[in-house]
Image: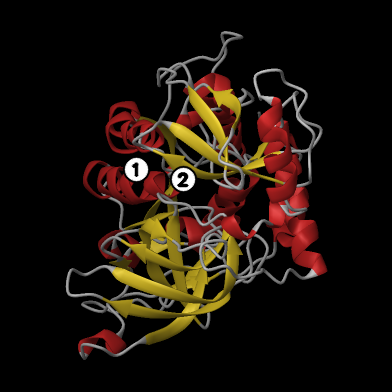
Amino acid sequence: MFKKVVVGISGGVDSAVAALLLKRKGFKVTGVFMKNWDIADETGTCQTQEDYKHAQWVCKKLEIPLVEVNFVKEYWNNVFSYLTEEYENGHTPNPDILCNKYIKFDEFFKFARKELQADAIATGHYVKTSFGPYLEHFKPNTNVRLLQGDDTVKDQTFFLSQVPQEALRYSMFPIGEHLKTNVKQIAHESKLDLILHKKESMGICFVGKRNFQDFISQYIPNKPGYLIDLDSGQVVGKHKGFHHWTIGQRVKLGSFPAAFYVYKKDIRSNNIIVVCRNNYIPINHFIETKYLRKLLLTLKVQGTNHPALYTDFIVTNTPHWISSEPSEFSNFGKLLCCDFRFQHRDPLVPCTVHKTLKNQLVIQISQPLRALTDGQFAILYKERECLGSAAITFSGPSYYSLKQEVEIKEEHDQKCDLKEKMASTST
């Protein structure tokens, strides 16, 4: 049934090995390089150019044809415009999820099927489906389920949680049953050394090696406001715009020895509410002496684990169910018990989900999580199946509002510190 397969070739090792495995299985393979961004960085180079050269090298090595397709307009309209709008509204979107939804599993899928007459498409994602890596279990008129890849560290179901069912039914994922180490070993044995040691793309694809704040400021005008300390209500600094900051991010102010962390973005006042890690003594003259006693009395040693940064309750917009809506929702008032995550590599956490009459999801999480952020996606799992996802529209109330303390395990505390270091290096 499936003979001609079009595989997305990115210029990296994962898509290269996916194409190699497809060819070994006897499929007629064609590679497609998607050009989604064409604006050079400040050095005058565009990462896309280097990736395309690597894609050409891979396809020549594998002796398969390569087609380049331009989706720049589609990416700008469906992904990047949404990203800038969300940042301006104080939200933190996930462009990688949207890229898979609108570009790779929509525009690319339609291009491969209609223009190249493909029977199926394939990508180098670390995921599996109920139809098998090569669609060997394909069933007509049957919905396919998205399953976690065997490499739990590299599993990418998170990023495919909004993928349309139509495209997923005709998608092959050859490396979903492999570990990353196995993929690299296959590449080495096949003499794909040029891309074997290529640095993996870990950030937003169109940013490249640039500082994200510098990059995004080219598209969103600065809108300055104040940094307000939550505990004291006092101004502790200024910010250039919401798009420079995300919830939970560390804010280091030269006027204070201790770091602050972003708690909330107030759209009405254009101010950012922050919390502090340690007691601090302000040395900036714009804070009057009469406020000093109040500041020192109200601040606690909390910071990154300040209860204002934690909540166990969120509301989402209309969810996208990959295979079908869970049967639990067939009866109003019945709850879905499943697992939750909102960050790619965070561990799954048990949760209880209620669907409202407006088709929103109300999610009660089994433990408080740090920096749940409006605009990010709530991804739901049951056993190893990714059920789907929905964008978070409300998070809270915080443990600070509920006057509850947060019990933090040592390993969780270390994880938060690592995230802070990563955030601070990107600013």
User: Which residue in the structure is indicated by mark 1?
Assistant: 103
The residue depicted at 73 percent of the width and 39 percent of the height is 293
Question: Which residue is rendered at x = 48% and y = 52% of the image?
Answer: 373
Q: Is residue 216 left or right of residue 268?
A: right
Circle 1 residues within 10 Å: few <14, some 14–19, many ≥20: many
Query: Front-most of 244 and 29?
Result: 244
Amino acid type at image mark 2: Asp
Q: Which residue sits at x=57%, y=27%?
A: 212
Q: Nearer the viewer, mark 2 or mark 1?
A: 2
Give percent across and percent down for residue 71: 33, 31
Look at the image and tell me whether residue 190 can be seen. Answer: no
Q: Is residue 229 above or below residue 209?
A: below
In the figure, 278 relative to 58: above or below?
below
- Which disc is residue 13 wearing? none
The quarter of the picture where the C terminus appears is: top right
The three-letter amino acid code for the residue at tag 1 is Ile
Residue situated in front as seen by the camera: 76 or 254: 254
Residue lying farthest left?
357
Q: Which residue is mark 2?
A: 96
- Counting residues from the start of the chain, the first of labels 2 and 1 encountered is 2
User: In this image, 296 relative to 247: left or right?
Assistant: right
Q: Where residue 36 sits: x, y (%)?
A: 40, 31
User: Residue 419's spot in the image, x, y percent?
Assistant: 70, 48
Viewer can see residue 250: yes
Q: CA distance from mark 2 to mark 1?
A: 10 Å
Label total for image: 2
